[in-house]
Structures are given as structure tokens and as C-alpha cells.
Image (spheres, grey):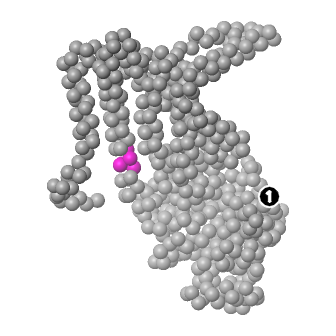
Amino acid sequence: MEKPEQRSFKERIIKFPWWLVSIGLVIIVTLLLIINTPSFNEAFVIMSAGISTTITITIIAYSISLLIGLIVGLGRVSSGVIAKNMATFYIEIVRGIPMLVLIFFTALVIIPGAIKLISLVGDKFIGIGWASVGEPLAGVNIRMVSMSFRAVIALSITYGAFSAEIFRAGIQSIHPGQMQAARSQGMSYGQAMKNVILPQAIRNMLPALGNDFISMLKDSSLVSVLAVRDVTHLARLYAGGSFRFTEAYSTLAVLYLCMTVLLSLVVKYIERRISTNDKS
Amino acid sequence: MTNPNGNHMIEIKNLNKWFGDLQALNNVNLTVQQGKVLVIVGPSGSGKSTLLRCINYLETPSNGEIRFMGNLLAENDDNLNCHRAEIGMVFQDFNLYAHLSVLDNITLALRVVKKIDRKTAEDIAMAQLEKVGIADKANKMPLQISGGQQQRAAIARALAMQPQLMLFDEPTSALDPEMIKEVLDVMMLLVEEGITMVIVTHEMGFARAAADEVIFMDYGCIVERNTPHGLFNKPKSDRTKLFLSQILQNN
């Protein structure tokens, strides 16, 4: 690729990422406030304890959602009637329910229900004399499942449906000839998927998956409704106790902004690398 | 391998294929003998590619039976993948694995299907690339080489599996004119080696030179089966005559 020797002044003005500079300014001003103003400083110190919770929940839930997405996405593109319908059922249900409602539902209905089921199964095992298998199962109690864990599962289930759609689109973006060539060489459907289709599909999916990660980082704030002590929850606590809403929520907003802007720059970089690779 | 039908490599009986309401193959019967080269010609939409793709079950026949070396092929049969591994296929659009280098394109199926270790697979691959004349492109990505080179790599990929049978689905139709010859030269090499081949092509000169038999297809039927000399010089059917006159006009 050749570069023009000298860009005109006007062109530079137009191409310059003013938006990024503006966001940088907003972040710097807030940082200065945090350093210089005691009330902002106090808000930040209290909230910063939640940053690691937010990041940990996001990373774990995102990893699980990728796994769900891969399995469900494969179901969506499979020719099996049962797999296809089960996958579509799950995706449509998740997409049809607001995320906040889904988080309540998973954390307070599905998971307690599942726990209850496990202990009932345990009782049944004890009933038929398999105490060694039954007793540990029967002893399972909903209080053993922390809210953070339930929050992670809730986010994973929600985002699993989104990444399933990304996997489906990624797999379908690969020319059918690739699958035919692999099958014609004697590879099974699974071997062809693993060795030929998915490596190409995942490369195409990287920008979308990156954006998904950013969305999840933001949506992880919803788990604060389950009293998980993430940044949002701590900000609400601080604001509620001190009535310093401006300090609490400005600091909170900028904290999220710092994380998402950094991540979106990474996604943009990956996007650019992929498109230059495609051209060569 | 047991082969009750003498030296029939492929035996097709009463093969039909529908795409919805469209009948792509209409009661096709065909045998191909070991070591022979069969060329299928015909207008587009005549079912010749569908017939070829039914032979390794890339298309599932609606009904009828296909035997490969005496074995009845069937969908969802565990043996189907084994049979496919013995049938090399070359596609119109090459279909090289876009994320792999030319060398890895050839070694992938050797490693995954035949469980050959990487080092041995690479030796096999290099020998095949040598044969098709692009050993120097082994480490290039498919999109970095020309169409003719890509198709030769695709042929090398199929040959590396040591197939009993090679299927060619219009191997030169997607190529620029100046690259057709290099691919046909490689195919001619295989003809001389005596590999059993079924070729769908519009290259009548190649058909004349390479084929033991030529089939003319139209509307999903085999209209005429003849020697190349017979089909091109004294076609028995009027439809064949019409098709050939149109082809010759265009050339």
C-alpha cells in the first residue's frame, strides 16, 4: 500500500479523531476532579473496590456465553430438526424478554428451581437406597449459591443467545464450497466444522464478539439489582447514603467510559488488521 | 476389496434427483470402468454437475443406487466418509481452504482423515505439488496465487489422498483463458497415469484428446454415450448435433 506524501491541512482536520480527544478530555477533567475534590475522591475510593468484581463477572460470564453461543450456534445451522428447534427456542425466548427481567428470573426462579430439583433427586436416590449418591445431592441448598454466581449464570444465559447468533452468522458467512471440499475429502461434519469452517468463521466474527464483550461489560451493571457489589451497586450505595448524586454517578459513568473506550479501540484495531489481511 | 462386478469402478442404476419440482436427473444409468476416462458434456442445467456430485454423495440422490467399487453408497453411512476419502474431487471454484497455506491445504485431510503425522503428510504434499509444478508456492496462501495455480493446488490436494477415482466439476470454467492450459496439462498427466476420472467440462478439445468415452446429457438424461471420435464426428442424436454446432459456433 502506498501512502500519499503529504496530506492537505483540510484533510487532516477532517480525518482527525476529534471524538476521541473529546472523550479523553472528559476523562481527564473527571480524573482531576477525583484527585482534587474530597467528595469525588471519596466516591471513587469506595467504588474502585467494585471494579475487579465488574471485570471478573464480565470475563467469566463472557467465557461461558461463548461456550453456550458455540453450541447453540452449531445447533442453529445444523440440519437436525430437534437441535435446530431447541436452539431457536432458546434464542427467541432470551431475545423476547428484557434483560433485567431475565436476570431476576434466572437468579430467583430458574436457579432456585434447579437447586430444588437436585435435592429432590437426591431424596429419591436415598429412597431407593443409594445413600452415597443421594446424600450429597439432597443436602444442596439455595443458600449455598451466591448472588454473584447467579448473576454470572444470568448474564451467560442472556449473552449466550447473542453470541449464538454471531456464531450462526459467522458460520453462514463461509462459502458452502469450503464444507463441500472438506466433506469430499472424507472429513466428517464435525471434523470439517472444527478444521475448516470454524477457524475461518471465528476470524470473521472477532469484531462482533469484541463488541459483544463491550456490551456485556456495560450490561453487567444490571447485576447490581441482585445486590452484587459491583461498581454500580457501590455507587448506588454511596449516593443513597451521602446524597452526593453528582459525584457518585459522574465517577461511575467515567469509570465505565474508561473501560469501554479502551476496549473499543482494541476492537477497532482488530477490525483493521483483519481487513488489511484480507486485502493482501 | 471385494468387487463382484468385475472392474466397474462406479455403477449407477436408475438415479433420479429432484430439486423441489425440478427434476435434475432423470433415470440415469451409467457404469465407469477402472482406468477409464469419462467426459460428460452438455448444456448448462443439463444435470451433469449434479450427476458428478451424486457420485460422492455431495448431493443426495432422490432415489436410485450408486455403487463405488461394488459398495452401495448411502447417506448417514459410517463408510461414506471412507469412500469419499477414496474419491478425489476438483471443483469449479477450487474451494481451497482459505485460512490455510497451500501446503496445509494438502496435509489437512491426510492428518485428520488418514491420521498421518505432519512430517510424512508434508512429504506427500510436496511430492504432489512437485508433480503439478507449484512446489515453490507451498507456503503461499490460496489468494496469493493465480487461479490456475489454485486449481493445480486443488488437484494436488485431491491426489495426495491417493484416490481410486477423480471427479472434475468444470475445473477450468472459472479460469482466465491463459490459465486453462496449465490445468488441462496437469489433467492430461493424470490421464497418462491411468487414473480413473469422470470429468464435466466444456473443453471439447480436451475431451477429444483425453476421453475414452464421452457422454452427452440434456434435461437430466443421458442422450448419447459414444467414443470421442464418434460423438464429435458422427453424433447419433439430433440434440447432440445441435449442441455441438452451437459450441463450435461459439469457438
Can residue B182 be spotted in the picture? no
Residue A63 or residue B94, whichever sits in front: A63
Q: Residue B223: horizontal and vertical position, in percent?
A: 76, 80
The C terminus of chain A, quarter of image: bottom left
Identified at 31% across, 24% down, the residue is A250
Q: Quadrant of the N terminus of chain A?
A: bottom left
The answer to whether residue B78 is above or below residue A128 is below
Q: Which residues are magenta?
A: A270-274
Considering the whole magenta stretch, tell me its main secondary structure. Answer: helix
Return the x and y of residue B175 as percentages of the image width and height.
Answer: 50, 72
- Can residue B238 be seen in this snapshot? yes
Q: Is residue A38 above or below residue B100?
A: above
Q: Nearer the viewer, residue A5 or B210?
A: A5
Q: Secondary structure at mark 1?
A: strand
Q: Amino acid at mark 1?
A: Leu
Name the residue at 48% across, 31% down. A62
